[in-house]
Image (cartoon, coloured by chain):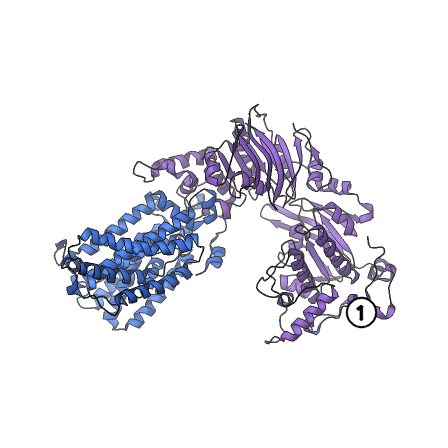
Chain colours: A blue, B purple
Amino acid sequence: MNGLRRWLRPEQLRELSLLALIIVALLIFGMQIENFLSARTFNRIAASVAIIGVVAVGQTLVVLTRNIDLSVGAIVGFTAYFMGMQLHANPSMPPLLALLLACAVGGLMGLVNGLLVAYGRIPAIITTLGTLAIYRMLLVNYADARTVTTDMVPAWVPGLAQANLFTLGDFGLRPMVALALAVVLLFQLVLVYTQFGRRLYAVGSNPEAARFAGLPARRTVLLAFVLCGALAGLAGFMFLSRFGNITVVAGQGMELQSVAAVVVGGVNTFGGSGTVVGALLGAVLIDLLGQGLIRWLGISEFWRDAILGLLILLAVASDALILTWLRRFWTPKETRLGRPSESVGPTRERRHGL
Amino acid sequence: MITSYELRVTSYELSVPSIVNPPALPALPFVKLTNREAEGSLSKGQSSIAMHSSQPQPTLLLRGITKRFGSTQALDGVGLAMYPGEIHALLGENGAGKSTLIKIITGVHQPDTGEILLDSRPIRIGSTLEAQAHGIAAIYQEPMMYPDLNVAENIFITHAGRGPLVNWRRVYREAESILDQLDVQLDVRQPARGLTVAAQQTVEIARAISLRVRVLIMDEPTAALSAHEVEQLFSLARRLREQGVAILFISHRMEEVFSIADRVTVFRDGRLISSAPRAEVTPEGAIRDMAGRTVEQLFPRSNTVQEETLVQVRELSKAGVFADVHFEVRKGEVLGFAGLVGARRTDVGLALFGVEPADSGEILLDGVARHVRSPNQAMALGIAYVSEDRRALGLSLPMAISANITLPTLRRYLSALGLVRGQAEAAEAEHYRQRLAIRAPSVAVEVGKLSGGNQQKVMLSKWLNTKPRLLILDEPTRGIDVGAKAEVHQMIDDLAAQGMAIILISSDLPEVLAMSDRVLVMREGRQVGLFSRAEATQERILAAAMGQAGGETVA
């Protein structure tokens, strides 16, 4: 038991409990819905989580610094459309270059957000609410009432979403899903093992302490926004690959889905704690519940959104309650020295409420 | 002096506005004074002060008040009597218990034992709202204003229970009438943002009057005021005294206390030391009462001062904050920074560390002039600053002990690929955990879970790990228990013995005296004394800190 305690920290328990919830949901849906546990369901969930997961990774970076990016949906839509048009005009573009171009376009939009937030001192929620509308308007202007369709792009683009890298029985690993997993893995490592990752946590959990430690707080926030934009750009490309048909409303609502995944995934909205793996699991749980409930109860999408809302509220409440309780359980009595100092949480939350 | 004040008859009339007339409040004694017009001018003997000299009955009487916070005995059986029409000055060093007493009177804290009597009837003050209902109000050095509301709204903001609708015409009229009574020119429609501190305090006083104040606490109200504004504030205070308000006045400026107070009370270490009419008190006597602190076993400092001077600071100034600070620190020397709260010692520390750089002056390290404009530069020069505010400025509570310790120096723990070498990091943190006896099961524990003393040690580890040559410690033992405090003192001695130059900013006077080789005293942004270890006594330092006498001697 002690060995287990040493190995697992309450923070990781968040991810484990999400995993447990996912398994429970799978079991319930599997028993209730015919053919639920099938390759088809898996592929469907994997395909949609791959996109929102990549966006959620970027969102995690931003939320860790006590900010938020509401413009990701518009960035996804813009890059999806932009890349569709570029590939249409220039079908011989190498796939790698296309991916990089998508990231660059998104990164540029993220740069604008980051500059306004970090150096313009405009609250992130206001900045990105503004750029959300502006980027969408850019798309509408650029599209000029035209639509990208599947037959306009080279065949390898939709292929990315349909081909299998390898198969195991009925289950196949799509390149897009592999890409998403790689992104999650990469950024999890960045958070744990790099100076930049450490700075994200430091800036988010105590900006003043970060300043006293001589950390470049603004640059860190800027970089978080740039990366978030770049990942949204990548997700835009994946969106194009999956759907093929891109209209001006592409990616709408993704900002809220990504925030939901991040919050359900245990990233503290007041910065300083959380992981991208958690955000991915959050995205999986949300999508699984959505798919399952639609098929099981035949509920409408609005119901699904309401359940999503409920999940977010539950996640936030459990942050405060369950984690405190778990920590108490996890800290052996003999090491509970003195009175743990009062958490800075509540006051901070009051000051920085969304 | 108040011997020859004249009554500007109409202005003393306290026509309590109808808007501030909740039926629950009892009639107030000073309302009797409204008909002074008919009596013409009064001599002093006939005023409300006469009432109390003939039959002294305190408005507010505190008896045997005790308050304990954790291991700190903030108040130990103190009593205080506040009479109508009397300005009662309360003196005491930092931590003497003044603030706690104010908080008890205003209902922020409840006393552990003791009783509070208002007009000889015992009352319980459960909240600031209840204090207001009893006619108790307080104004502070930093006025509590709603910057976006206008003056009139600020005056009446705390009034509750007068129906759902606001009669704006009446609000403005009555705000104006209160300000008229105070003989103050202020536009009641002007937003509070942008008012001077003095004007904001006036608004607070007007707010207190609108609540029919009987007991007014003025907590260091003059600290941010110019001399002229202080005079205006005092004339307001005297005017309220005329009207029979009992005033408790707290200030660190002796000359103010002795120019306005009718009675002077001194607190020390949560106890009442003396209380006497002003005429029977001298500034010297008051300082003696404040300082006569029993010093429990002094920490035995070894003499570690080396010949070599590490830091020289010349005429360091920052506009509106501090000016002409000049000192030097040798290797192995502990230079104490003494002064009362607001003396700007921390600001000098922040300037040396580059967080809030100074405007002018020189900082020399090893005789070479250096510009310190950012914490990064300071760290590169071997300067470290351990902040007094662990939670807000020092530590990232959700992060592990090891991550906190390596935060400013993470570069050292990166591998060739730029990845953090977790083992090297943990090993370093483990080294400090053992060296400073940080009580935690492992260095992976979140700092937020540690006790205050252990958090303090993590802070120290973090900055010691930058390998500083000059260590600035700002209140390193505030709020930590006796055992941890002794450990911190031991550590300071060890570090000095290793040749580190240390600046110790502390409001704990015995600590400064015990730990320092020399003591620099600041007062309101000015350096007012520099004492060698032999010369430094509590009385001398306090006298300098309160502006009574200076001493400039260099050891």
Residue under label 1, please give it. Answer: B34
Tell me residue A191's x, y (percent).
Answer: 33, 47
- Tell me: A242 left or right of B349: left
Q: In this view, does B477 lie above or below A22?
A: above
Q: Can residue A15 be seen at all in this image of the molecule?
A: no
Q: Residue at x 17, y 52 (%)?
A: A94
Q: Residue at x 43, y 40 (%)?
A: B408
Q: Which of A211 and A271 is in front in this view?
A: A211
Q: Residue at x 33, y 45 (%)?
A: A192
Q: What residue type is labelled 1?
A: Thr
Tell me residue B218's x, y (percent).
Answer: 69, 55
Q: In this view, does B121 lie above or below B318?
A: below
Badge 1 crowding class, 10 Å Cα cut-off, few under 14, some 14 to 19, many 20 or more, is some
- Tell me: B422 left or right of B194: left
Tell me residue A85's x, y (percent).
Answer: 21, 61
Q: Is residue B497 above or below residue B179?
A: above
Numbered disc 1: secondary structure: helix
Tell me residue B35's x, y (percent).
Answer: 82, 70
In which image quadrant can residue B200 be found?
A: bottom right
- Tell me: B384 left or right of A17: right
